[in-house]
Amino acid sequence: MWEKLHRFPPRYGPEWGSGGIFGLRYHNEVLYFTVAFEAEAHFIREDSHRIYEFELVGEKPTSGGDTYNAVEVVDEFIYFGGWVHAPAIYEGKGNGKATINFVNKYSHVHEYDTENDSIRLVWKESIHHPTDWAGEVSDIIYDPYNDRLLLAREDGHQNLGIYALDRRTGKIEQLNPEPSPKGTIVHDTAFFGIGNNFTEGLREIHAIDMITGKWEKFNLGQSIDGDNYIHAHTGAMGSAYNRAFAFVRGGLFVGNPLNDEPFNFVRLFDFYTFYAPFRINALHVDGGILIAYNSHHDAFYKPRTPEEVEFARLTNTIVGPSVLVYIAPPMIKIVGVFGARVTSLEKAMGKILIATNTTPNVGALDATPFDTGNRDIVILDEKILQDKPPQVSFSLPLAFPSMAMEFGAGTFGGIPLDGYKEPRLILYASKDNELTVYEYDLSLPLSPAYTDKFDIKKGKNIIDLSSFSGIVSFKLKEQDFNGKVRIDLR
């Protein structure tokens, strides 16, 4: 089966920059994934390789497919969702702009029958608007009590929220009108992150009791390092230890308010850029959760306004590689180092399948008639979860946490130290300062961080982190817009 996998260079698929390989799922001896933006759903068996181009949605040429890992399995069926242009309309390039027309953009859910190799369109929807679109399907969760699919829809202009889809008839019903990118099941309850990802980020978590149908709303709690968090854009959700995990830009929320444990925040890889666990799935494996924090998933390619220039700086500053981390409380362990972004994760036959991409999704006026990324699937042994962590470094201009201090935040990092013998921080300061180091872990229930303080002198400062354990984050007493920090993990 692995011999049928290959690299996917840029090919026809009108959209915004690059999509990726999404929805990796191995079920009933079939490996499924969708290649975006080419709109190709692949179904690989030992003796065959089928490619479906979403022609049941509309006319070819198609583009899109899925960019959030919307996939679920029930019995012999694989349900895959997302969005697709059918047909795609590339409007060309001129006057410094390149655009596509969204009039044929559909949200969709398909069913693949692994027993007879058949594909059925369960549901599709479009608002047929040239610039706006109906909410994409960004997550599919099976509700086993009611035998239905729960759909999370946040990316779009109309028909957002949480929906129930009858997987047999295709009848759809809105259960919650609030935009939601992701959800997860804990016990008999489905938790959903609520908020607009490209503006405010996560603002609440809503939960539906799948037995009674009752909804509850939960506020977000505090960071265990005592500082504020900002722009907590939701990337993925998962569940373990009877808690829900929401992986966001800057860290993660974990808890279960139904058992009086609030959703508090654990800072993780918070650099005040767009480094985030975005456009990736949380993989439940070996009793824990595997997740990637991505270096370059969404970005402005060519900013045209002063506001876009600022966002371009946030989205195009590369502070470190993408990292694969394994969540096994109280530990968070780095188990892999990759390039621009990881787009999908799956476990199959003792292997971890990791879909990667060299290029981000970009903005509306920089459309291309083809996908711009080089995408492939890396196959690693499952034992990477037990191996020593790989060497990795992060390099951050201190201007980013200094700007965040103006919004009441500024604590940066959240660096897992488990498995490293020689971790260190090198701080190039433009003036004398004071650095607070916060030390904590992911023990459940969460507990507050411990602190240490270090005097910082103008110039180069080296702080040995080997005396710390768990996770460490940092905060300067005063802003330093001209300084720089490097974190080396060896």
Image: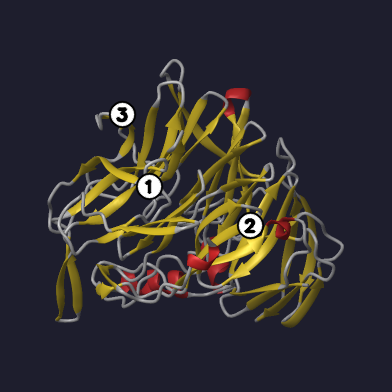
Q: Quadrant of residue 319?
A: bottom right
Dot 3: few (<14), some (14–19), or many (≥20) neighbours within 10 Å? Answer: some
Q: Can you say whether 54 is above or below 110 in the image? A: below
State the image coordinates of residue 36 (x, y, percent, origin top left). 35, 63
What residue is at 83 percent from the left and 71 percent from the top? 422
What residue is at 20 percent from the left and 50 percent from the top? 57
Q: Circle 1 sits on which residue?
A: 138
Dot 1: few (<14), some (14–19), or many (≥20) neighbours within 10 Å? Answer: many
Q: The residue under label 1 is which amino acid type?
A: Ser
Say whether disc 1 or disc 2 marks the residue closer to the N-terminus.
1
Q: The residue under label 3 is which amino acid type?
A: Asp
Q: The residue under label 2 is which amino acid type?
A: Lys
Q: Circle 2 sits on which residue?
A: 351
Q: What element carries label 3?
A: loop
CA gap, disc 2 to disc 3? Answer: 33 Å
The reply to whether callout 3 and callout 1 are in contact (CB within 8 Å) is no
Name of the residue lying farthest toward the bottom: 459
Name of the residue lying farthest toward the top: 212
Q: Circle 3 sits on which residue?
A: 166
Q: Quadrant of the C terminus?
A: bottom right
The one nearer the camera, 472 or 206, is: 206
State the image coordinates of residue 308 (x, y, percent, origin top left). 33, 71
Q: What element carries label 2?
A: strand
Left or right: 486 in relation to 364: right
Q: Quadrant of residue 158?
A: top left
Q: Nearest to the eye among marks 1 and 2: give it.
A: 2
* Residue 366 shows in this picture: no
Say whether disc 3 or disc 1 marks the residue closer to the N-terminus.
1
